[in-house]
Image: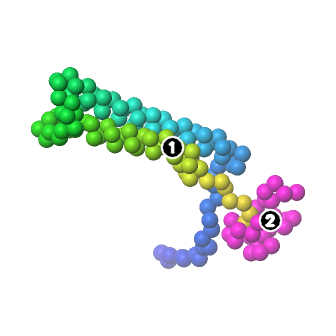
Amino acid sequence: MVASWRYTVAMPRRSAIPPERINAVRAIGTLVVRAAAAWCLVFGAYLVLKKVLFAVGIGDPAHAFRIYMEDGDKQSTYRGLALIAVGAALALLSRRIGVWVVPVPTTGCPRCGYPTPDAEGRCPECGLPGFERDGVE
């Protein structure tokens, strides 16, 4: 059995999402990131409040920030503060994360990037056939 090697040109990947659906997909992605941010904020606040209210209840407010290695709680105050910080960062950056994860598809020739093909759908720069003019008549 002889292995045949074929030279292929590395072409940039085109987005699988049609351009008219980019905003809808970004909105769904932003919603998911914001839901994760809300979960982090709520669960972090629960962990912090649980420890602080316990410390106030026993009459020792400093107890909330003490670290006990033998305690089964494993210091929920600091875990809660970390979750609140992550949740706040996700909430503030959710729109940018959506834009970063779902980029706008590239237009033009997928091989060389030339902006507009000729009338037959071939690239005038490199000759690649079979792509359409993006909204240009």
Q: Are marks 1 and 2 in contact (CB under 8 Å)?
A: no
State the residue lying farthest toward the left.
Answer: 70
- Name the residue rendered at 55%, 41% in the picture: 30
Q: Which mark is residue 92?
A: 1
Residue 88, percent from left and from top: 44, 41
Relative to 117, residue 87 above or below: above
Which percent across, then down, holds residue 64? 22, 34
Image: magenta residue range: 110-137
Of discs 1 and 2, which sits in the foreground? 1
Depth order, front residue of 46/3: 46
Q: Residue at x 78, y 57 (%)?
A: 134
Image check: 5 left or right of 64?
right
Secondary structure of the residue carrying tag 2 is loop
Q: Which residue is mark 2?
A: 116
Q: Is residue 137 visible?
A: yes
Q: Chief secondary structure of the magenta span?
A: loop
Identified by mark 2, the residue type is Thr
In the image, residue 9 sits, relative to residue 45, either above or below, namely: below
Residue 74 drawn at (x, y percent)? 20, 38
